[in-house]
Amino acid sequence: MRKFILLAAGVLLSVGTLAACVGGPPPPPPTDPHDVLTVGDSVSFSLGCALGDPGEIAGIPPGSCPSTPDYSTHNDWVGACTMTPGTLSLYNGGTAGAPNCNSVPAGSRNLTWQDEANFFVPRVVVINTAGWEIQDRFFSFSQPPDGQWGANNQFFNNIAAQYTNQLFNAINAFRSSPRDPVVLIANAPYIDPPQPLPAPGSVPAGVECSWWEPNDGGPPVSQGPDCTGDSTPGSGGQWRSPTGNTSYRSSHGKLDQLNAMINQVKSQYFGGDPKVQVFNFKKHFNGTNNDYNDYVCPPPNDFNVTPDPLTHNCAITNPSPGVVPAILARAPDKGHLSPAGTTDILKPYLDQCVRSKLGLGGGVPASCT
Amino acid sequence: MRRVTARVKRMKRTLLTTGLLLGGLALAACGSEGPGVQARQAGDTTPTTTPETTTTTAAPATTAAPATTVAPATAPAQPPCTDEALGAAYAPQHGNTAALRAQSCEGGWATSSEGHGYGPPTFTLYRAEGDHWVVVNHSAAKLCEGQGVPPDVAPRIGCDT
């Protein structure tokens, strides 16, 4: 009898242990929790980089961005990413389906923003799209393009409605993700590309010289050396209508409208939700003249001191009276940020803002605004 | 009688050992994982990135050229600040210079930007050595920190500090 009891005990122990291994409900979907998720286009790269992660960028190792040792970030930038659907009217005269990174799987993991939120389960999300967002596009295939920022007509109403709808959906998707994250929508500083982009040879044939959103009040001449105003390789040549039936509208005016729509989405749909906020990206790069600037005075004087146009020096009084060199804040393409723009201008504010949302030391809520 | 008792004791030991072995084997099987994702936990502050690496291709800050060989910020003589002059230093290490653009040059230091289609640009830091430039670092945003760029020069060439 004792033999039987002992043998039975051993067998039961084995079976019980194995049952614990293989039984029960299916495992939850895999996650890779990060405190912060940044999404958007190639300019949004700088937002994620300022928070510590370069994402996937050719030939650049993970340590290429400032470190943020007490919180983790996943930078999910996707080049030319937009939220607005439709078909882009390319500057080179072609058309291309809009790369809707929020609703169509994108990036190397081929995920939508909702998928990203469920996988990285962030506590803070930062959204930024702009450069390709403001390009003319077709929602129907009528001519001229029936989506136009910078206009003041039905074409503007069409594209503004599509954009705000998608931004609303994206915010809702992130807000409903597992860790109830704060959503920061970064507005857009002005840009002043001196020529159409991308350069021939850097992208597949047919999409070179396909984007040009100058800041100038009137149609400028391409400064090259990659693309002419006619989207051929080289320099020179004035801006011309890609479709032959649109007027010139500067990116300055387009971005004013886009930024106004961001504010409208916040106030109209998320006015009572303190976890949805606009991060004032443009404030730190548009300077005292509220325009595109290569040089910006270092924080905390970036938005209230004007650099001398010749010496690029800043006469400051804060934190103490003196003269300091202004920072060359933008890349030569006059759209992306320089390393100094990312690290020495954007990072101090964005880091303090994000810290305040994560409840970490050094957080400054006012740095968000 | 004693022989019977001894046999019973031996049997007990054998059965106990067998039971424990079976249990142990089952536990061992349970503990051996197949391939899977190691999820980070909420609040885990360990960076997910691999330890920092560097693409520094010239001497690091600690072995930077002596100050006497670095042109002062006001020095007028330095190699040309052109795509071609910077590209000549860049090409042997990083290849294609078709989308390389000079950003700024001052005080014997220079930066360039390299376009990558629809992606963000990368950046390269150079130091003047005689009549030519040499690559010091190639990166995204953490380009100049610790590379010995004088503090009055760094902001003017778009260098992080």
Image (cartoon, coloured by chain):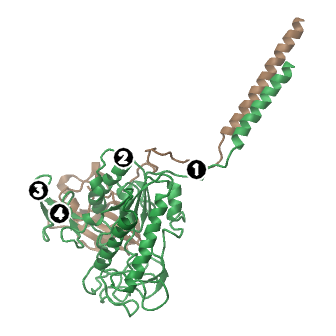
Chain colours: A green, B brown
Considering the numbered disc 3 on the image, is that residue within a helix, a strand or a loop?
loop
Disc 2 is placed on an element classified as loop
**Alpha carbon of mark 1 to alpha carbon of mark 4: how far?**
48 Å
Q: Residue A304 bears which disc, if any?
A: 4
Amino acid type assigned to the residue bearing label 3 in the image: Thr
Q: What is the crowding at mark 1: few (fewer than 14 residues within 10 Å), some, or many (at least 20)?
A: few
Residue A359: which numbered mark, if any? Answer: 2
Q: Quadrant of residue A207?
A: bottom left
Give coordinates of residue B41: x percent, y percent: 50, 45
Circles 1 and 3: CB distance less than 8 Å?
no
Helix, strand or loop under label 4? loop
Residue type, numbered disc 4: Asn
Dot 4 or dot 2, earlier in sequence: 4
The nearer-to-camera label among 1 and 3 is 3
Tell me, yes or no, whether dots 2 and 3 are on the same chain.
Answer: yes
> Which residue is denoted by mark 3 in the rendering?
A317
Mark 2 chain: A
Residue A209 in view of the camera: no
Amino acid type, mark 1: Val
- Point out the tag, 2 or 3, that comes first from the N-terminus: 3
Which quarter shows the C terminus of chain A? bottom left
